[in-house]
Image: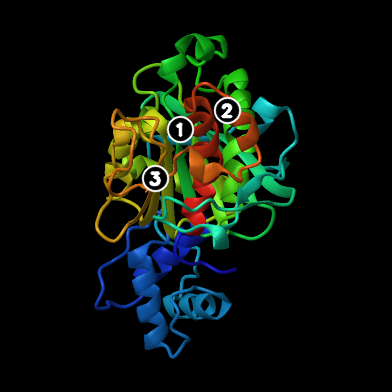
Amino acid sequence: MLLSYGSTGDAVRALQGALNALPPTLLPLLTVDGFFGGKTHSRVLEFQRNHGLVADGIAGPNTLAVVEEQSGNGVGNGPPPPTSNVTVEAITKNVLGLETQHGLVRQFVPALPMIDLPTFRAGDPENMPAFSFTPLKVARLGIFACGKAGVERSVILFLPENGVPQNVLIGVSHQFKQNTAHYEGLGWTNPRSAPLIHFVLLKHLIRRWAPQVLTAPQPTAFFHIVRAAGGHELGPFQNDGAFVKEALQKMSALTNNAFGFSSVQAFTFSNGIFDFNDFLSGIQSSLNVTRVISMDPRYAFKAKVKPGVVAKQYLSGQTHPAGGPVPGFEFLPFKRWWNEPSHPMARTLPSKFQYLHNYALPNYTLSLGLRS
């Protein structure tokens, strides 16, 4: 067993409790919360140095054996975990009607074209990059209901086929209230509505976001919030970083620690930017946010990131009155998409909004922002 930054669950609680049972150190006692964060990492490093172990901050078999020996009570005897009003329930089987393993099923992800990164030149208005197809891939898929104080939202989780990714990408889509009649027909007053989740899964994730996430240079868990009616569309996720963190912890535990979140990235699209900045203010105080991607935001509003966070922001010229370049954004007007496979058909359209804003930007720039 390996426990490292971002690991969650009972094994981490046991480790924290055992470390607390050791003689006093230069560091404060750990909160036994089942999350391997910065303080637990530092305490493990200190323990390893004090006992002649490889000091890498990872609690592997050698470190755990010495912890158990030194604590005298076994690694499993830490204090009980604190109670919480945050609930996370695996609903994959209920929604999809499929048998699961640790709340997950296998899901094919289609082959789609992506921007050929070596041919892309940022900031060059004359650059028209090439495109190449990604291969058909297999991922792991889970659906979860996350709630606090009686308010729930569903989350769709995509994981690579193999491995335990330690990076999480959180998706905040465009607002659904701009098409209320459509989402009412999908039962969006019920956050667990199967038609609503099926629609988001197929249209927004399998056909758009998920193939792009799988092109990320590091293995990445994709955590997508399904908007619903009743209060704020994002529900308890809106501006509560502590809730997001605990939901991630519990979701990881339900999947048998299939992912960690030592680093967190987040993205939004279109008018989702209006909610996204509130969401960012919450998670940037609770999680290690390293990268933010904003695709064609309404009125060219910028994502509000802390110093040191990488911001990749893309603009088509279709969502703000000026219609041209804006400082801080990569400007991607119609002519830069000349080599995109659907571009010949789009040249005949009377308006470029449908092609640029509803197709090109959301279908390509998430992958571009993850890889560049």
Residue 85's quadrant in the figure? top left
Viewer-nearest residue: 17 or 247: 247
- Residue beneath label 1, please? 173
**Mark on residue 331?**
3
- Out of 115 and 44, give the one closest to the viewer: 115
Q: Secondary structure at mark 2?
A: helix
Q: Is residue 297 above or below residue 102?
A: above
Mark 3: amino acid: Phe
- Residue at the spot of label 2: 200
Q: Residues within 10 Å of mark 1 (few under 14, many from 20)?
A: many
Q: Nearer the viewer, mark 3 or mark 1?
A: 3
Q: Residues within 10 Å of mark 2 (few under 14, many from 20)?
A: some
Residue 255 appears in the rendering: no
Tell me where residue 71 appears, x and y as whole percent: 43, 75
Q: Using the image, determine if residue 297 lies above or below residue 245.
A: above
Identify residue type, mark 2: Val
Q: In the picture provided, is 285 more to the left or to the right than 51?
A: left
Relative side of 322 to 219, left or right: left
Of residues 21 and 124, the one drawn nearer to the viewer in this rendering: 124
Classify the position of the N terminus by image quarter: bottom right
* Marks 2/1: CA–CA distance: 10 Å
Q: How far apart are labels 3 and 2 at the CA level?
A: 28 Å
